[in-house]
């Protein structure tokens, strides 16, 4: 008995040929059960254990994977759409490492019932600092949005987020009289302490690329404007009985090469900050 397929218009025909085969034995692909079609899709796409969506990507995880489907799954719109969803659900179920621009990249177009049980490492590369979630205009997203993703990752161990130093400053302030927010104001806006509700989380790293601009306003060193925040956050962790490895890394505001002979790093408490040294001077 032989199995073969052929395409007629938008329909892909699956049939089994034997001595007793007649036209009534021919089954259209779209008539197969959805579970069987999904198995066929994922057998073609294979397993993706690491999902890394570049920061320049303005779409969602679904649209990102759709663009990477094999050509054989682009026969028509329905097959492409079903294959992309099957690929996404399979990926979210088995992958261990996820790097995406923002929480909305994962939250959009994915039902609330979908969980990311296999994820152990999660990173958001776009600044987390405002409450709005808008992947189209690349508005920085909040820790609250991050928490919505984190709660779906029951096995999460390591979290990395890009933050902006602007989250520390009060809005609508006078240009020549900047005011730092209280820790209560920061948490009310961005809900960082909600991250501590995740029981399996062991390591948190925050990365900031604009501390130099904001430190200049206060005539302070980079790490000084973040020290009260890091001390407060770790105190909240200890109060909740959480033993979490925490670090805030302050990086240059432009692209740099690491290791760079003139770039050095200094650790102060929970903060790692950069400084430049003149190796020729």
Image: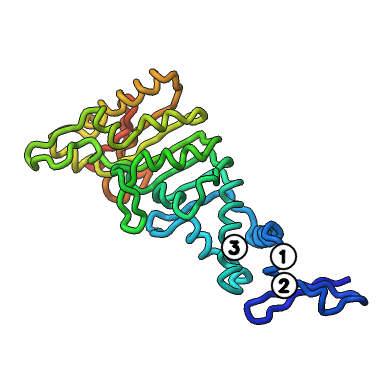
Q: Position of residue 147 (x, y in %)?
A: 42, 38
The percent coordinates of residue 67 (x first, y second) are 51, 65
Cα gap from disc 1 to disc 2, whole angstroms: 7 Å
User: The C terminus lies in which quarter of the figure?
Assistant: top left
**Depth order, front residue of 245/102:** 102
Q: CA distance from mark 3 to mark 1?
A: 13 Å
Task: State which mark lies toward you, 3 or 1.
Answer: 1
> What label sits on residue 176 in the rendered view?
none
Residue 149: x percent and y percent?
46, 42
Disc 3 target residue: 82
Give the vertical position of 223 relative to 23 (above or below). Answer: above
State whether residue 12 is above or below residue 204: below
Query: Which residue lies under the disc numbered 2?
Result: 28
Name the front one of labels 3 and 2: 2
Contact (Cβ within 8 Å) of mark 1 with mark 2: yes
- Near mark 1 (Cα within 10 A), the count class, few <14, some 14-19 or many ≥20, is few
In this picture, is 164 found above or below 25?
above
Q: Residue at x 26, y 27 (%)?
A: 184
For residue 18, what is the image quadrant? bottom right
Which residue is situated farthest in the right direction here? Answer: 19
Quarter of the image where the N terminus is located? bottom right
Please give the residue where the numbered disc 1 appears in the rendered image: 32
Q: Can residue 262 be seen in the rendering of this structure?
A: no
* Residue at the (59%, 63%) spot, across then down: 82
Quarter holding residue 34? bottom right
Q: Mark 3 near mark 1, Cβ–Cβ under 8 Å?
A: no
């Amino acid at each position: 008995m032989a199995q073969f397929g052929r395409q007629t218009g938008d329909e892909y025909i699956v049939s089994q040929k034997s001595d007793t085969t007649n036209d009534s034995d021919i089954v259209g692909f779209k008539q197969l059960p959805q579970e069987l079609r999904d198995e066929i899709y994922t057998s073609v796409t294979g397993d993706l254990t690491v999902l890394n969506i570049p920061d320049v990507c303005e779409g969602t995880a679904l649209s990102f994977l759709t663009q990477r489907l094999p050509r054989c799954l682009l026969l028509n719109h329905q097959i492409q759409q079903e294959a992309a969803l099957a690929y996404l659900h399979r990926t979210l179920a088995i992958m261990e490492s996820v790097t995406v621009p923002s929480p909305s990249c994962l939250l959009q177009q994915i039902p609330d019932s979908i969980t990311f049980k296999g994820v152990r490492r999660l990173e958001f590369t776009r600044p987390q600092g405002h409450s709005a979630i808008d992947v189209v205009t690349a508005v920085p997203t909040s820790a609250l949005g991050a928490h919505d993703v984190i709660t779906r990752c029951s096995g999460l161990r390591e979290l990395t987020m890009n933050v902006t130093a602007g989250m520390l400053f009060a809005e609508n302030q006078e240009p020549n009289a900047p005011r730092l927010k209280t820790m209560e104001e920061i948490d009310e806006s961005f809900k960082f302490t909600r991250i501590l509700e995740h029981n399996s989380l062991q390591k948190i790293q925050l990365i900031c690329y604009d501390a130099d601009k904001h430190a200049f306003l206060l005539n302070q060193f980079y790490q000084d404007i973040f020290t009260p925040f890091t001390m407060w956050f770790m105190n909240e962790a200890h109060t909740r009985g959480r033993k979490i490895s925490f670090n805030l890394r302050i990086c240059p505001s432009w692209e740099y090469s690491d290791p760079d002979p003139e770039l050095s790093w200094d650790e102060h408490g929970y903060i790692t900050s950069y400084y430049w040294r003149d190796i020729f001077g």
